[in-house]
């Protein structure tokens, strides 16, 4: 879907913001760029819709270089959600969502139906919110409208630049949960930027950690938890080992999910979360067995959510 081939971005003052990035983002994947401030993650994102232009190398969307796309058509076909939201204050919510469909000359009835469909999708009642102005909405509600606007013309790619970081912790966590459910419905390729490793672990299919414009490690949340590439990665994700060493019996008491799964793959309740992650590299879910009886189920998402909650508790205790 999106391919970076030795891509670099150098500004006029000589600053190299992106340095020889070589990676592929798969069709339908939720891909997260993360790293410290100034690492190049946002610049890398903006190269995709040509808000910044590539200096060296080639960037492709569906095997066509982005530089060869008509820039207006390129941006019409890429949804973009910002941290600042940037809704037009003088327009209603419906008018804000309608901008790209109107530019594409959609029929009025089709636009109205699409607005109502998207408001429902992001959890806002159309009759209640359609004719309101942005100033009448909370920050979390405005961000939901921002997501709806990005989806309005049904683009195959959505770019999200730290969309939840300006929200209060409760609104941020609620939007994370809602977006996890939403991404299963919309089936888009989503490229997401964040500085919060817990957020990346929670929502990403794969994560790219950057430093000084370079890619340090690309992998699944499990790869980062179990197989950090170097000390920088370890320090960025924090110490997870004490959590990974918990037995699955303890995990069930604190955070297991009890959902039906297919397949016969099992693991003993005395094994650790770390042991289970090895099995979850090859299976969607594993049944936890004690004395030949299933006492719970462990999945990739349940582990990542559990680690997220543990990290959140540690951050609170450290304040």
Image: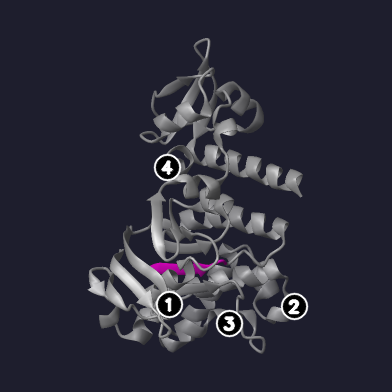
For the residues marked 2 and 3, what is the alpha-carbon distance in whole angstroms? 14 Å
Q: Range of the magenta residues?
A: 155-162
The structure residue drawn at horizontal position 59% and vertical position 33%, both measured from the top left corner, is: 243
- Labels 3 and 4: the sequence-earlier one: 3
Which residue in the protein does label 2 denote?
136
Say whether residue 194 is left or right of residue 2.
right
Of the two numbered discs 1 and 4 in the rendering, the one whose residue sits closer to the viewer: 1
- Labels 1 and 3: the sequence-earlier one: 1
For the residues marked 1 and 4, what is the alpha-carbon distance in whole angstroms? 31 Å
For the residues marked 3 and 4, what is the alpha-carbon distance in whole angstroms? 40 Å
Residue 153 x %, y %:
44, 76
- Near mark 3 (Cα within 10 A), the count class, few <14, some 14-19 or many ≥20, is many
> Which of these two is toward me, 295 or 247?
247
Residue 224 x %, y %:
46, 44
Label 4 residue SS: helix
For the residues marked 4 and 2, what is the alpha-carbon distance in whole angstroms? 43 Å
Which residue in the protein does label 3 denote?
96
Label 3 residue SS: helix
For the residues marked 1 and 3, what is the alpha-carbon distance in whole angstroms? 36 Å
Of the two numbered discs 4 and 2 in the rendering, the one whose residue sits closer to the viewer: 4
- Reply above or below: 309 against 2: above
- Labels 1 and 2: the sequence-earlier one: 1
The structure residue drawn at horizontal position 37% and vertical position 58%, both measured from the top left corner, is: 28
Say whether residue 265 is left or right of residue 148.
left
> Which of these two is toward me, 247 or 73?
247
Q: Residue 15 carries which label?
A: 1
Of the two numbered discs 1 and 2 in the rendering, the one whose residue sits closer to the viewer: 1
| Magenta span contains residue 159 | yes
Predominant SS along the magenta part: strand
């Amino acid at each position: 879907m999106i391919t970076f081939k030795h891509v670099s971005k150098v500004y006029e003052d000589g600053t190299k913001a992106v340095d020889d990035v070589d990676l592929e983002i798969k069709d339908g994947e939720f891909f997260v760029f993360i790293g410290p401030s100034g690492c190049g993650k946002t610049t890398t994102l903006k190269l995709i819709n040509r808000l910044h232009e590539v200096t060296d190398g080639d960037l492709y969307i569906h095997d066509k270089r982005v530089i060869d796309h008509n820039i207006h058509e390129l941006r019409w076909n890429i949804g973009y959600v910002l941290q600042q939201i940037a809704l037009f204050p003088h327009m209603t919510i419906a008018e804000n969502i309608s901008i790209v469909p109107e530019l594409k000359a959609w029929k009025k009835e089709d636009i109205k139906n699409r607005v109502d469909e998207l408001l429902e999708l992001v959890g806002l009642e159309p009759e209640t919110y359609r004719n309101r102005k942005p100033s009448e909405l909370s920050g979390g509600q405005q961000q939901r409208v921002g997501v709806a606007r990005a989806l309005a013309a049904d683009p195959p790619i959505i770019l999200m630049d730290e969309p939840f970081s300006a929200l209060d912790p409760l609104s941020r966590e609620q939007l994370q949960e809602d977006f996890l459910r939403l991404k299963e419905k919309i089936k888009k390729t989503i490229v997401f930027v964040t500085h919060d490793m817990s957020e990346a672990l929670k929502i990403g299919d794969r994560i790219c950690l950057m430093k000084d414009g370079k890619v340090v490690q690309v992998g699944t949340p499990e790869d980062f938890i179990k197989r950090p590439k170097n000390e920088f990665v370890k320090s960025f994700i924090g110490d997870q080992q004490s959590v990974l060493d918990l037995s699955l019996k303890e995990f069930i008491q604190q955070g297991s999910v009890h959902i039906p799964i297919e397949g016969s793959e099992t693991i003993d309740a005395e094994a650790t979360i770390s042991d289970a992650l090895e099995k979850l590299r090859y299976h969607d879910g594993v049944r936890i067995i004690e004395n030949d009886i299933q006492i719970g189920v462990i999945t990739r998402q349940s582990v990542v959510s559990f680690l997220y909650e543990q990290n959140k508790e540690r951050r609170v205790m450290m304040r």
